[in-house]
Amino acid sequence: MYREYLRKFKDVVPAVCHKNPDPSNEANTDGRNLSYNSKNGGQQTTRSGGSEALDKSTSQADVNNGGTSQNSQAATTNPDQTGEVITIPVTRGQITPEMVGRGNKIDSLTDFKVLISLSMSGKIQQETDINLARRAYDGDLSLEYPSSAKIVRIFTSSTFTDTKFERNTWMEKAYPRLKRYCLARGYEFQVVDMRWGVRDEATDDHRGTELCLRELELCQTLSTGPNFISLLSHKYGYTSLPREIDAEEFLKIFTSTEKDDQNLLNKWYKRDDNSLPPVFVLQTISKLLPDFMSRDQEKKKAAKSIWWNESEALQKTLTDVSKKVLGEKEAMKYILSITHLEVLKGVLESKDPSTECLWYKRTIKDIEHLEPSWQLSRYIECLGPVEKWQNSRQLLGKLKQKMSDILPTSNVQEYNVSWAEKGIDPTRADHADYLNHINDDFEQKMMKMIGSAINKRENAGTQEPLLQECLQHLEFCQRKSQAFGRSDDLQKIKAYLEGTSSLPFVVHATSGSGKTTVLAMAASKTKAWLSANVSVVVRFVGTTSESTDLFPFLQNLTQHIKKAKGEYAFRVEGDLKRLVSEFHASLQGVRPDRPLVIYIDALDQFSAGNAARELFWLPKILPDSVKLVVSTLEEAKYECFRKLKSFIEDESNFLHVKPFTKDDVQHIITNWLESDRRILTVEQRNMLSSAFNECPLALYLRLSYDTASSWASYHFGDEIRLEKTVRASINELFRRLEVMHGQVLTSRAFGYITAAKSGLSEAELEDILSCDDDVLNDVYMYWTPPIRRLPPLLLVRLKASLEDKHYLVKRGVDGVIVMFWYHRQFYEAAYERYCDPSVSLIIHTGIADFFSGIWAQGNKKSYTDLQGHLDASDRQVVEQPFCIADRYNTRKLNNLAYHRILSQDLNKAKEDCLCNFQFIIHRIKGTSVRQLMEDFELAGDVYPNDESINYIGHALRLSQSALIYDGDTLVSQMLGRLPSNEFTRDFLNQCEAAGVPYLRSSRCVLQQTGGQLQCALHGDDDEVWFLDMTKDGTTIVSSAASNIVKLWNVNKGKLIRSIDDLDKMVRNVHFINGDTSILVRTSNTLVCLTLLGDVIFRIPLVQHSLYVIGGHEKRTLCMYKDEWLQFYDLTNGTLKHRLTIQGVALTDPRGYRDFAHSFRLNLNYSTQELMALVDNTSKSFILLEIDSKTTPRVCRVFNDDGDEEELEIDAIAITNENSHVIVSSWLRNDLLFFSTRTLEKTRVIKGLKTDFSEKFQISYDGRYLFFPSKEQIVIYNLETQERKAILRHAHDIAVVRTVNMTKFVTVCGDNSIFIWNTAIEEIKGQKEGFIGTSVSHLLKIPNSYYVVTLTSHKNDFYIQVHDVKTGVKVRQAKLFNDHQNGTGLRPKISGMVSEKTILMPTNSRRFKNVSLETMKPTLVYKGRTSRYSPVAIISDGTEIATCTRGKSHVKIQCTTTGVTTCIIRTEANKNFKIDNILTGPRGGLILVFYYKCNDISVIDVKNRHLRYVINMASELQFLTDSLFSVEISPDDSYLLLTERKTPKGYKPKSKLDYIPVIYDVESRTAIDLFDRYQDVENFILRGKSKISVDEVAILNKNQIVTSHEDGVVRVWDSKTAIKSGQPRW
């Protein structure tokens, strides 16, 4: 780019801008007004307050008159907010502020300087942050958006030989500290030092200057805060030969050159007519001097000598002749040094030099008067032709003056040092002090500037994660849309957008066909096609960390859509089902005048988690004014294309991206060449065209063109060879890069990028390579550096070779910008070439070491150099803590375990990750439990026999549900599940020493690892209802109250996919057709699905009918109701035949009574040949043959009278050999065998009365019958009649499945699925000190360490007293219980009457006091109460309040005599009965609640009367007759009631949220804690939180505490709220 400026170097055009100094700007604080006289005519350049007008032709009078000129045509901008006008003479470049605003390219150096003037004067109005965000959310692809990278990236500009010690000091001391400082703020710190580590390869191709300016521009673009640091001192620096010279200009110089010089020019410069305009190109050194790259040092030295001699001669010729034939100004391009160009770009092009640029200006006293010498020449030009070095000093002086004029004094640090024999000598005390001083100054100033810039950036709001995600996709789209061709494809997309289709539009192709480019081009043209008002939302799956997994993808996409619609958008949390629902809801309500178009590229790039590629989340029908364009690969393994085909039937909504036609190819090549200002010779163009004909893929065309566009016109024959395939082209590209940059460096750099889990940032890769001694030994073959690190220039050159062609792209991952391959084929080729088994362990070890931080914080890494010497050095690698400031270090958490495991270093994998408590808890809290389990799954594959990993992994699998709910339970879960042994002891010690609060039981209350429970899957966020398992035991299908069907891998305990686009009432699920498909029962339909979730057919389900599945491979379904039966073929869903039974009704009567839960019953059974169905009396069963249409037979099991009157068939099964039907009733649980031939009872196996017979199943081998019986599984051996109970659960088992009687899968009424292995011996001592199956009541005894509990085990209940300090059970008493016989009350504890007495109800409907010392009743209260009467202890424990027998009034009883002291009438409606009685801590106030009534009676205990009745609807605006929570204040002055209501001031009115209400007892005033509209706006409209409270409680009489979803606990002043009517917090 700089060559374009210099090539068109003309007279500087006047551009004058006035601006009053801004006292708030750091650049103005010095108050300087500097001027200098330019040598070019003596014009004066004035700068005030840090702003410079680059005016070298306008007089001071013109400046005072606003910068106009009589002889100049002027372009005037509109006045800004201060009323000032900018006048810009229209110049050759025709630049205007409007052009700048549109982002037009700069076409001349004049334009360049005008732009600088405008920018520095502050008159180019920058897009405000709000406007930028609005345009980004609106999908404006014409705007150049700021970088989303969180990077501080500085370019250090200096001459090489004279600043070595300063740069080394910064590298050793300042840079590591600045890295740590930036890391703590969540930013990367990168240094670009192009003067260090320059190899011969960097000189060979003459691209050094271009790379310097390119990297400097990148620093200016990416860096937050400072980006340019100059160490300019006395040395002007090296002037490089121009790599290209305009042909016309070259010929002018050539014709004016002596013969010998012409020969030299002819030798090194060749004309390239492929360039537009033609240029003469400087040849690579090694092409003419092959020994320049030789490993023979003598030959290399000779070649270098020739080059330097000839290059100096070339430089002198170009300089001297160009001055004569081109003039002084045009000749400057051949004179300016690289350092001079860097300063021009770094300072003059800076948007704000005061915040971006620093100059550390060292002055060596009297250096200009010292005797010339080689050592002095390293610090100042003094050798060679006097005219040359004098001219260099003059240019340096002018450059320094210009820098002084532009930079504020606070940005220029000056140092005066004396000359030493060696120049700067760190061994001298004064020079060592100077180096320490410049280092300290640099550190402090940089930290100040960085901190200020970060604060400004974060306060600006552009760091909002949603906006950053949006910007990354827009930037990617802008890059990919710079293409040509595909007009037919684009027209099809345009026609869809303009059409009426309400279906998504699908772009599909094979890999490398260019579908991503098509989508990007369409997105960039959408506003032009439709209107400027259309909102365009683009997502390129897999290009960012937030777009790879479905959950964060939908979170961001939903928020983005709401922002685009102008709605307030908060980040949706919760389960995936809710998120999908919110996504679909966000598409509603789009205005016709502001349509919405969504582009989602590469559906196949979604990770397999959450069944993202099943596309259940994708809307099938789009709302009005919404269009959706998606793309995917066609390969079946990605599933997406097949799924799209299943629900989009209109073929016109599919666009197959076909190979380019020949005309397309010629058009694209022509456009690409025009864009690059290139042409090709006829031979070259034919070569390119014919090569594409052999491999007609877009990616191949791109690769081949990139090769061909580098051909010069003098290349022909073997020099213009192209590969025949994409893979071969990529490999050839890699080969060339290996030659250009070195095989070791290239292979390792690409190997690290390829093997990395999600790519690597530039800083990460540089650190990793700096610890790779194979790379460093190769780099340092002929040179020993001051610091053992990779020279940044080497990586910059390698990266530029790929980024220029966009083969290596950048994407946001874990908050940093990482590099990764642009296309899957690049990844595959690189993996095959650079990650083979011989080096993969080295690569994974290098990445793992980096993320572990093992070589950070001054830790020295040992190495052996090429001479065999052993040493160690600090590699200055960035630290890797688990947390950085207030955020988790997700880069470490997501990468460390992965690479440690694959490095196959077991000890480090365990030490750093898998057996490291800190890693595990940070992994859970910083990422997710799922991702942690993936680490252990990978470890299980690599280290299947490691006991420590198996123990901890097993414990984590058992704890998944708890850890998903709260990661802080990790300590409790691990201590409760892991046995203490040699494999776990160290990890358990880490848990105890972690400093995390935890609960630890004195007895075993959790299932331990090593036992029979193998895994507890988090089956759903709602209750899991049903499951089935394949015959081979590898896969589970489950249904849940969330109406989601899920498939699970049993062996891995991992979700395969979710299917949730079925019905609102999903119930049963079954594997059918030999486990190749799934049958799902919904509210009114039976739906058959493939294992991928595609619908095969539907069978309408007749209301109140039942069904049974059987036949060969479960391919037959019998639906039945009353007298009819219908048989269906489950391979296609067709009706096979019908049967009618006379005199028998089949439908289960219990299904009619509670049909919503009838799916839980299975009062039928089927084998391959027979079906048995229980009739509606539950006394008989019907037996029928599946493949026969004969009349079924009826078998009577129980009679209607006698001792069988109460018996019903509760369970039924058929033996595998079809010889017997087995039935049972849960009242007796005997197994009754009936012959299928005679229907006679032939056998009885006596059952256990305490069992609960239901849901009989027969094992596959026919030997066992098993069923869930309450909280355990009962198994009968049908041969020996032996019974056993196994696998006791905490709750009743709802469903059990097994295939081999060893591996069981169970569901027990919660959201988990349990996988068991009974082949493993049950852990001994599990029930030692057993407390009970469940604890139903727990009360703390005041002023002690004791608690009293009511526990139960089976049918027994116990009162227990525990010392929580010692963990000892001090007392226990068994209670008599006849609740199971239906004659008594279930035991409960109603409260504490005193420290030694509890209150309990009796079976006679009275209350009793029970002593905790004797564990016996001490008092039975007089008079009966109602069954399960509510009770409250009042008057400081001296009385109780309960209800009368009819539940109409309240009676007060004395706790010492048991006598009723009074009855208080509640004046309630007789139709409403008392439901609950509540009192406060003081016990002076009673609240009475009624069943299905919204009244609350308030009773004054002291005065024994009803004070008043509160109506919740009229006084509190609660819309229900129940309450979320209610409390009475400690002084009985107010009530705190919480329930759903419409917040005041919130719209829409129908919105309900849980709102706490303070109710003053005296004044009867009700005050919402969110009574003000401002609170609603703060919580809802600004998206901070939902207005609903999660928890609410009274702290004391003056304070109330609430918690919300924003994670903030708020404390409210209740008294202020009551007095003022306004809450305060």
Image: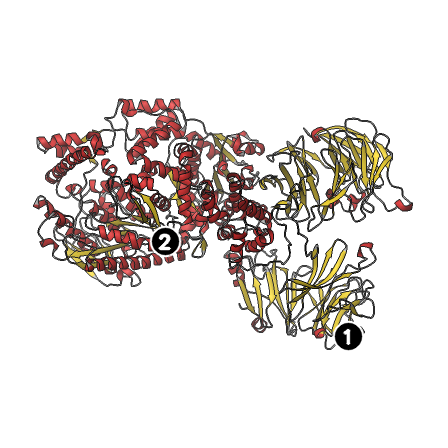
Say which of 120 and 79 sits in front.
120
Which label number is shown at residue 831?
A: none
Q: Quick one: SS at disc 2?
A: loop
Q: Is residue 1164 left or right of residue 263?
A: right
Residue shown at 62% from the left, 37% from the top: 1035
Which amino acid does the dot numbered 1 rest on? Thr
Say which of 1 and 798 sits in front.
798
The furthest residue to the bottom: 1503
| Residue 534 seen in the figure | no
Say which of 215 and 750 sits in front.
750
Q: Which residue is mark 1?
A: 1456
Q: Position of residue 1049 (x, y in %)?
A: 60, 38
Which amino acid does the dot numbered 2 rest on? Gln
Q: Which residue is mark 2?
A: 857
Q: Position of residue 763 (x, y in %)?
A: 35, 46
Can you say whether 961 is above or below 1263 in the image? Answer: below
Label 1 or label 2, whichever lies nearer to me, is 2
Residue shown at 81% from the left, 57% from the top: 1378
Residue 1504, picture quadrant: bottom right
The furthest residue to the right: 1202
Can you say whether 11 is above or below 659 in the image? Answer: below
Badge 2 crowding class, 10 Å Cα cut-off, few under 14, some 14 to 19, many 20 or more, is some
Q: Position of residue 852 (x, y in %)?
A: 42, 48
Residue shown at 33% from the left, 39% from the top: 774
